[in-house]
Amino acid sequence: MTDQSPSQRDGTAGSHDPADAEPDSTPPSVSPGDKSGDETHTTVSTTVDAPAEPPPAPPPPQESADDSAAPRRTARRAGIAAAIVVAALGVAYGVLYFVAGDSLARGATVAGIDVGGMTPSEAEATLAEQLPGVVDAPVHLTMADGETSFEIVPSEAGLTIDVPATVASVPGGSANPVSLVRSLMGTDAVAPVPAVDEQALTAAVEDVANGANAEPVNGSVAFDGGKVVTSEPQNGVAVDVEASVERLTAAYFGDSSTELPIGDVELVVDEVEPAVTADEVQRAVEKFAEPAMSAPVTVAAGDETAEIPPDMIAQALSMSPDGEGVLRPKLDAAELADVAHDVLAEIGQEGKDATVTIQNGAPVVVPAQPGQGVQPDTLGEAILPALTESGAERRAEVELTEVEPELTTEAAKELGVTEVVSEFTTSFPHAEYRNVNIGTAAASIDNTLLLPGEEFSLNEIVGERTEANGFTAGTIINGGRLEESLGGGVSQVATTTFHAAYVAGLEDVEHWPHSIYFDRYPVGQEATVAWGAKDMRFANDTPYGVVVDTSFTPSSPGSNGSLTVRLWSTKHYKVETSVSERYDHTSPRTIYDTSENCAPQGGSQGFSITSYRKVWDPDGKLVKDEEDPWAYNPNHKVVCGADPDR
């Protein structure tokens, strides 16, 4: 091996120079050789005394002292530079944090509310206070027509703002360096972050849909007075709740949001077609309705016949759609039998209901009488197919059967008409028209039987006051004055009957006291009637039958007439009646009349009064507690002649 230099042993790096190494062997000798031609040959020979040792490996290269120190100096410089950068960044961050702190970006606004420079907690408090007044303005949900709208308040419909999330979306407000930089750079409007309660919003839209939805209107065919009447179909609308919720959610600071206020949001609406179309209406008219009203239908029972005209048939005929929207005819046989009662009476023999009458001062049951007639169901089945026929084919063949009365003899006996439960009598001064009119009306209502639940109507029973109905002209009140007219005096019957029903405790359906008080009537508890305007009605609200029994005594010169009305039934109610003192008196005025038909009239005061009635049922329960005030007009004085002061 080669020897190391002192510098190598000391670990000092140096460069290797081959000239400094000692020779490893004896250099070879060179002798002149033989020459051939012009060339000279040299022969080299080597003398080897012993096997030669392999040459030693060259020594490793050695570094100098300057080369070893350079990397260490570079690392020290890099460390110092990094420390300087970190220190600079720290200083910069410190400056940023000192300037920006935890404040939000300057100039930041949320829905127009300034939150720039605030801390997050300050911003949350500000938004919580001010946002509702800005973003909670009512939203108008409109229909496609642009005219119909429905108002909802966002917060009441599950639409609110997530304030913490909104503040978190504003730049700044944290120690994050990026946030600090963005805070110093500033920003402008930041959209509120919505919070949507899907369940509450769906419920609110469903409420709107309930008011907005419109059912489609089917085309229709009807009958009126023997004529065909049609109506055109109309499409309906139905709010698509799910799609409308999505649209409203998008409008409330979502994908489709606009500037505040949100304003109008159009509902998603589906059109709903009716089941019965215009074509179906036309078909029904041509194929059924017009033929049905074209002529009467002949009803035949053996040799007996009767014709039912179209206007009667129309009252019981209708058309309605089936499940597929096809209009089908329907004939109400019971209604037709009732409407055509008088016509059908020409076929067979009409029966009679049982009834109760007062004979010789006692109630008597008059037995029912069965009849021969057409059963309603049979009538309907025979007529309906004949409606589309013409000529002689418009014929309905029926069979007569025994017709039981509606009120049988046995049922009449169970009505409990056994005693007088109330009665009242009024008197009247002599006048022949009173004898005629009061007597006629009293006879009309005599022995009227009211079943439980039925109603008494004086106008309906007595009829219009005409000469044909047995009435004559008499005195009536018209505009505060007494004058002549047909039926004068019938109010005597109305008053007497009303008061009997009143003290019996029966239901007061309608009554009108006179406009002027007459002292022959019970004050505040009397009634007048006028054909087509005022009626006297009461209802039998007891479980028993009620029979109206009248007793009339005509007047004569120098003698008053009288009318007594008794109600027969079973005592059911306990009744107390009373009236107040008269109050609010008014004075009459004087009227001068120069007409030929003037009738002088003395004057009397007007006044107000209140009538009271309490009614108890058999169990002692108060079932009626009534207070009925009435104001009587003054009876003006009428002088036949000219006003002397004019």
Image: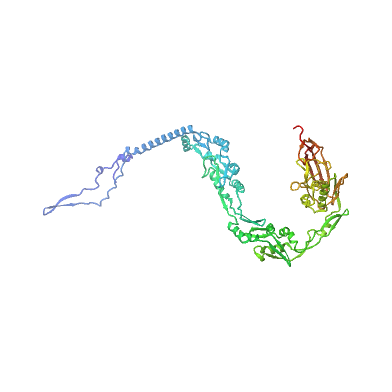
> Does 25 sit left or right of 247 as displayed?
left
Q: Nearer the viewer, residue 90 or 56?
A: 90
Whether residue 455 is visible here, answered yes or no, is no
> Does 50 sit left or right of 545 as displayed?
left
| Coloration mode | rainbow
Q: Nearer the viewer, residue 107 or 464?
A: 464
Whether residue 599 is visible here, answered yes or no, is yes
Q: Nearer the viewer, residue 425 or 428?
A: 428
Total numbered labels:
0
In the picture, residue 132 is in which quadrant? top right
> Does 525 sit left or right of 207 as displayed?
right
Q: Is residue 219 placed above or below 515 in the rendered structure?
A: below
In the picture, residue 384 is in which quadrant? bottom right
> Does 59 sit left or right of 364 as displayed?
left
Q: Position of residue 167 (x, y in %)?
A: 53, 38
Most extreme residue toward the front is 596
Q: Position of residue 545 (x, y in %)?
A: 82, 53
Q: Quadrant of the C terminus?
A: top right
Q: Is residue 238 placed above or below 388 in the rendered structure?
A: above
Q: Position of residue 48 (x, y in %)?
A: 22, 52
Q: Position of residue 625 (x, y in %)?
A: 79, 43
Most extreme residue toward the left is 37
Q: Nearer the viewer, residue 183 or 476?
A: 476
